[in-house]
Amino acid sequence: MDDALRVRNFCIIAHIDHGKSTLADRLLEITHTLPERAMQAQVLDDMDLERERGITIKSHPILMRWERSPGEVYRFNLIDTPGHVDFTYEVSRSLAACEGAVLVVDAAQGVEAQTLANLYLALDNDLTILPVINKIDLPGARVDAVREELVRILGVAPAEVLALSAKTGEGVPALLAAIADRLPPPPPPNGSPLRALIFDSRYDSYLGAVATVRVMDGAVAPGDRVRFLATGRSCEVHEVGHFVMARRADARLVAGDVGYVVTGAKQVRDVRVGDTLAADVEPALAPLPGYRPAKPMVFSGLYPVLSEDYELLRESLQKLQLNDAAISYEPETSAALGFGFRCGFLGLLHMEIVQERLEREYGVAMIATLPNVEFRVSLKDGRELRVENPARMPDAAQVAAVAEPVVRGTIYTPSEYVGAVLGLCVERRGVQEGMTYLDGRRVELHFRLPLAEVVVDFHDRLKNLSRGHASFDYEYAGHEAGDLVRLSVLVNGDPVDALSCIVHRDKAEHWGRRLVERLKAEIPRQLFPVALQAAVGSRVLARVNISALRKNVTAKCYGGDITRKRKLLEKQKEGKKRMKRVGNVDIPQDAFLAILKVER
């Protein structure tokens, strides 16, 4: 058999915590890709954050060689993908580089929301699906019931659904044989010049931008001249190779290979994820089709705690964007926080991960503002604006209509929690579109929900109400008009733009009251009274006062005439009046973080 026919490019897709990384560990063990001393749990999850949270954040490609019989060696290019809804973009990039996908389903949990979302992504990319039931060693495993679910969804024969335990290794050798037999090899070379899809990239302090590529046509070797088609930049290839945990240099990459290319590009903007790396020929080759760029759904302002760290934050965002192309950012200024960046994220977990990576990997201390979504504002003069920052919301007298993004959500939940889940969705202004009982104990719910009600704490509330059993996935479904207003927070009569937000009019008073009460607990007392107000336009909805600290100015008076004490107290009173007029309230970072924890 030709060596090219023994290449398999595949990824592992599943709902979060269904055993993708553990299965990858067993595959690496059985194929002897890593020495035994290098093996550890979740070996492909190489970031501290991934290990601490027990989730996969980045896709990880690795080359495995499996000797099926003497002289019959297969090359498996495996890509382990994330399972959380916020990292669907990582999954879509991995799918673009593969011909097949191993769909992993937990034997106890069954098919969940993100399972279906990833499955449909794979089918859209015309991938061959290999269904697998994992965790058959659990006491609560429902292998037959889950197999029936997969047969119904995929339309395959029951015998085609493999059952295994990634933890114990039972059934994993049969999976390797199924990958070799049932997943297709890459298309044969057609003699065309080099074209490779950049589906990931990393920044290296010594090598610069390192592109992770899937070679579609031709071949690439050190010394070749290549061009990035999106930017038009051409450069010379310094090194190519494969990933076997770390980079391993090779003589060349050919059509069907997954590996890395080092071009010496130092500017992170030159190596864009989704771009095509092509041979430097004239006329320029056409870029590869079918790749969709990321669409940020949640926006937040990131500001350095120290103003002199602004340039450090800019450089850190540039480097992190190379590693995580789903981030978008642009400079902005705030009267309260100074210079910073308005950043776009795929979801709230994505935002948290980016913040932690900036702090850990680049040492940037920062403040994040309340996350918002993108609103479309129609003005009375006929213009239409896109508003990502509530501080830029026009005055209510100029606004004709405001449209907010809505999502189509799918929720899988055990039947005993249906009432609580329905109540949560209605509370978040959701509109029910359907409800299906999959069997005696599982229900599938379909809702249209405003994205602003989903991104902050919807997922946490859903998990609490269902004791961790419900799963949720959503997709963007357009913008819809709503009765939305800007809720401003005033500190001593001065609006703080970084604390403002856009909410539905019916919820403005409740949200404003909770907001000022939480701020009162976080802002330290001053030497003068401080008024905290939540207002919509000129109408104040809620107010709390932070009482003044009192300095005992009469402590130094021992006896003597009472008029002496009165004179000191009058002088203090006048000083407090003057301080109230000109004094500034320093809002600590904890106050901005506390807003994220306020329940809507």
Image (cartoon, rainbow, N blue to C red):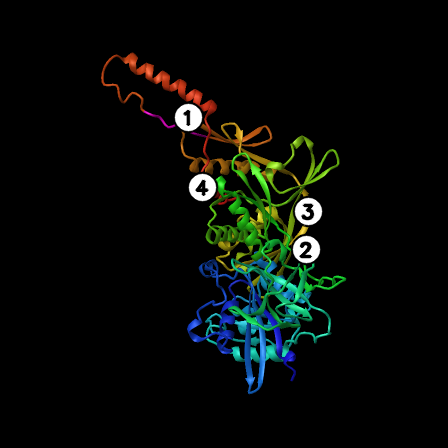
Q: Which mark is drawn over residue 231?
A: 2
In terms of secondary structure, what is the magenta stretch mainly?
loop
Q: Is residue 440 above or below residue 67?
A: above
The x and y percentages for residue 297 are 61, 50
**Which amino acid is tagged 3?**
His
In this picture, is 316 found above or below 101?
Answer: above
Residue located farthest toward the right when viewing the structure as drawn = 283
Residue 224 numbered mark, or none: none
Name the N-terminal-most of marks 2 and 1.
Answer: 2
Which label sits in the foreground, 2 or 1? 2
Few, some or many residues within 10 Å of mark 2 (<14, 14–19, 20+): few
Q: Which residue is mark 1?
A: 528
- Asked which quadrant contains residue 212, the reply is bottom right
State the extent of the magenta-drawn residues as a range: 545-551
Q: Is residue 145 visible?
A: no
Q: Residue at x 67, y 64 (%)?
A: 226
CA distance separating discs 3 and 1: 45 Å
**Residue under the image location 37 percent in, 28 percent down:** 549
Rounded to the nearest angstrom, the CA distance separating label 2 from label 1 is 57 Å
Do residues under tags 4 and 2 come within 8 Å of each other at their CB atoms?
no
- Dot label at residue 590: 4
Lower sequence index among marks 2 and 3: 2
Q: Determine contact: label 1, label 4, CB under 8 Å.
A: no
Q: Which mark is residue 479?
A: 3
How busy is the neighbourhood of tag 1: few (under 14 within 10 Å), some, or many (20 plus)? Answer: many
Instruction: Locate residue 533, reporting x and y percent.
Output: 51, 31
Q: Quadrant of the N terminus?
A: bottom right
Real-space CA distance between mark 3 and mark 4, rounded to the nearest whole angstrom? 33 Å
Amino acid at circle 2: Thr
- First in sequence: mark 3 vs mark 4: 3
